[in-house]
Image: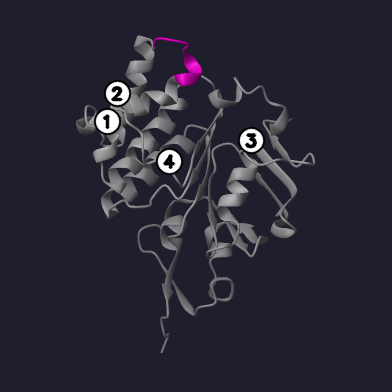
Amino acid sequence: MLKAKNVRFAVKNHLLLDEISFAAEKGEFIAILGPNGAGKSTLLSYISNELEQKNKTVLFKEKLISQWDKRELPLHKAKFSQHQAGDITLEIKDVVMMGRYPYFDNTPSEKDGQAVEKWMEATDTTHLKNRSYEHLSGGERQRVHLARVLTQLENNIENKIILLDEPLNNLDVSHQFKTLEIIKNLTEKNNTAIVVLHDINLASQFADKILLLKKGKLVAYDTPANVLTEEMISEVYNFPCYVSVNPINQQPLILFGQNKK
């Protein structure tokens, strides 16, 4: 689905990404983890083709992502950004409809409206449809933008990719799990998700693979069981931890500051 090779990115001689390589297969849920400043959001922006790629470093569906037609790419790829505009003066149903802009010129079709309704219901935002965006809470805005991004990928194209930068910000526990379940369900339909997360245990519970970063470098890229070890997590986050087993799915459960004794 997507292959990054020797990704290197710097701003004013400050190296933010240092020779990162990995491949994301169809149907995989990949979580990007790492401490603040590790380069998580920068990497997601880079592989999304939002940052200048001076070398042939990112392939999407076996084609350089920088060579995709700008009108065609949004039908295959959608990205949820960490920072959203706070001054949108639209009703919520119109904000979500923005995800359908690649599909119509002037007037949305019935199919566009159905896509909006489907994903507003899935993200628990239907009751907000006539509310003004300006008057929503942070968590409500987060869910609205998630609905917008999901609406963008409501089409018959196979093997789509969704990239999400901290989609769980401002969400309560229930909506965090619902969001991750939505993403997981997408990957089970042969789509790919690459998601920046801060909660290591949620990443362990839902992700197929963990991409672990520290100071712009790739530390590990493998299954949760192989990446989330006491030695590796303690070293990357510079804080002691104890790894137990999650009784729900037998994946690693990280307890920070836990003393085995």
Judging by the rendered image, the residue that carries numbered circle 4 is 183
- Point out which mark residue 1 bears: 3
- x and y percentages locating residue 217 in the rendered image: 68, 61
Q: Is residue 140 left or right of residue 48?
A: left
Query: Which of the 4 image quadrants contains residue 115?
Result: top left
- x and y percentages locating residue 94 in the rendered image: 33, 24
Viewer-closest of 17 and 223: 17
Asked if the residues shown at circle 3 and circle 4 are in contact, with their CB atoms under 8 angstroms apart, the answer is no
Q: Is residue 227 left or right of residue 116?
A: right
Mark 4 to mark 1 CA distance (whole Å):
15 Å
Viewer-closest of 49 and 192: 49
Identify which residue is drawn at 71% across, 59% down: 15
Judging by the rendered image, the residue that carries numbered circle 2 is 117
Disc 4 or 1, which lies upstream in sequence? 1
Quadrant in the picture for the C terminus: bottom left
Write down the region rendered in magenta.
Answer: 101-107
Q: Between label 2 and label 3, give the one nearer the viewer.
A: 2
Q: Is residue 103 magenta?
A: yes
Mark 3 to mark 1 CA distance (whole Å):
29 Å
Q: Is residue 19 magenta?
A: no
Q: Secondary structure at mark 1?
A: helix
Disc 3 or 4, which lies upstream in sequence? 3
Judging by the rendered image, the residue that carries numbered circle 1 is 121
Give the amino acid type for the residue marked by disc 2 in the picture. Answer: Glu
Mark 2 to mark 3 CA distance (whole Å):
29 Å
Crowding near pointer 4: few (<14 within 10 Å), some, many (20+)? many
Disc 3 or 1, which lies upstream in sequence? 3
Q: Is residue 155 visible?
A: no
Disc 2 or 3, which lies upstream in sequence? 3
Crowding near pointer 3: few (<14 within 10 Å), some, many (20+)? some
Residue 15, compared with residue 129, is above or below; it is below
